[in-house]
Amino acid sequence: MKVVYADNNATTMVAPEVIEAMLPYFTEHYGNPSSMHSFGGQVAKKIEVARQQVADILGADPSEIVFTSCGTESDNAAIWGILRANPHKRHMVTSRVEHPAVYNLCKYLAQSGYHVTELGVDSNGMLNLNELADAVREDTAIVSIMYANNETGVIFPIEEIGAIVKQKGSILHTDAVQAVGKIPLDLSKSTIDLLTLSGHKLHAPKGVGALFVRKGITFSPFIIGGHQEKNRRGGTENVPSIIGLGKACELAKKFMSEETTRVKQLRDKLEDEILKKAPDPRVNGHRTQRLPNTTNMSFEFVEGEAILLLLNEKGICASSGSACTSGSLEPSHVLRAMGVPFTAVHGSVRLSLSRYNTMEDVDYIIEHLPPIIRRLREISPYGRETKVKEQTARASARI
Ligand code: PLP
């Protein structure tokens, strides 16, 4: 069956060049990078090449890159690392739309005696920076605000956020898992102190990530063990995946400007056509301050799961912010924080593209998604009810 993969914010295909770069590190170069012999030493050297490649896409110094096992670990390492290094500071600030890697950690911290201020967002998914300025206190150890939202693609003005955080004397961590590889970043001229990225969102494998820790930031390791990563993360390195992550960063940097424009054109066509062709659509999230590859749309009075199942029958892979998807019983906390009406939260679909998507893919989704929505509205009791109300209203207007 034809497969159109439009769920790239969930995970991406590993680039063939990345697999090729990784393979020798499973077979002939299997040494431990910490070993004294040159068999391990050559692997250690290759890890340094990968560190440089990751640093290059961020505009960072290689010494500021710590390899981890995933985005979730990097987020935990950043927040715990700063809290542990500053035990006298018991307050932190975050937003209500963070990924669970930060959101649920902050809930846990709040239950464990830390003070956590959660900043709300407006209907476009944007923060109020005055609220942020009021929230940062003398005892604020860390502010953790994401770079770009995984569900809506909304991009926060991270440098403005950083300027406020710096002025107040605190530390800024940003979860940039959805931003790295999709939009240009330059940490050499930035207010960001710590930044999270994850391999599998940029065509590297699952199970590898990195944390940028700016020089001079005091940070306690999250995983305590051996001396790997200059004592910042214990554990023998996942060598093939680290090499894959380096290659993926090199490729993303190379393709960035060309592919960002092309993917944005695909996303815009997809969104515009679905807005025209499907009944009662809405786009969730700021229309311009947004990742070029993501659209989050809602269709009133239909269930997101039903849309996904019918898309799946056509071979189209997408995600939903409605209940029960991704094993959660709760509808999307991001869409709820934005005040998206309940009926629309339940009928939300996220389509996220990558450099491997084509215009043919987009045309295929445009062909199949609107009829699916119409079909579901026909059988939805709410949809029928609204239709009857609309017909009655039109009839009375004619009288
Ligand atoms: N942060 C964001 C914004 C994400 O989208 C994700 C994954 O979806 C993560 C963190 C977690 O990354 P990982 O799956 O590598 O743990």
Image (spheres, grey):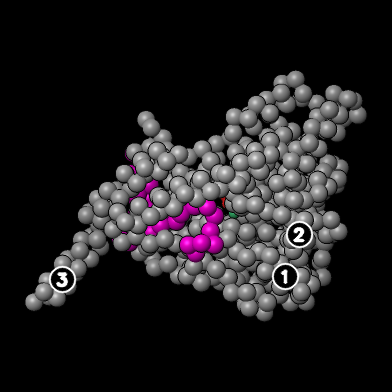
Upstream in the sequence, badge 1 or badge 2?
1
Which residues are the magenta region? 286-313
**Looking at the image, can residue 383 be seen?**
yes
Q: Quadrant of residue 214?
A: bottom right
Upstream in the sequence, badge 1 or badge 3?
1
Task: Give the crowd class for mark 1: few <14, some 14-19, many >=20 residues within 10 Å.
Answer: some
- What is the three-letter code of the residue carrying label 3? Arg
In this rendering, is residue 101 above or below 397? Answer: above
The residue wearing badge 1 is 163
Task: Give the crowd class for mark 2: few <14, some 14-19, many >=20 residues within 10 Å.
Answer: few
Magenta stretch: residue 262 in it? Answer: no
Q: Position of residue 72 (x, y in %)?
A: 65, 50
Q: CA distance from mark 1 to mark 2?
A: 12 Å
In this rendering, is residue 373 above or below 207? Answer: below
The residue wearing badge 2 is 189
Single out the mark in the foreground, 2 or 3.
Answer: 2
In this rendered view, identify the residue nearer to me: 399 or 174. Answer: 399
Q: Secondary structure at mark 3?
A: helix
Q: Quadrant of residue 386?
A: bottom left
The residue wearing badge 3 is 394
Q: Position of residue 131 (x, y in %)?
A: 62, 77
Q: Position of residue 142 (x, y in %)?
A: 73, 66
From this viewpoint, which residue is outermost toward the right? 36
Q: Position of residue 340 (x, y in %)?
A: 42, 67
- What is the three-letter code of the residue carrying label 1? Ala
Q: Secondary structure at mark 1?
A: helix
Residue shown at 20%/61% (left/top)? Answer: 384
**The C terminus: image quadrant:** bottom left
In this rendering, is residue 132 above or below 217? Answer: below
Residue shown at 47%/66% (left/top)? Answer: 336
Upstream in the sequence, badge 2 or badge 3?
2
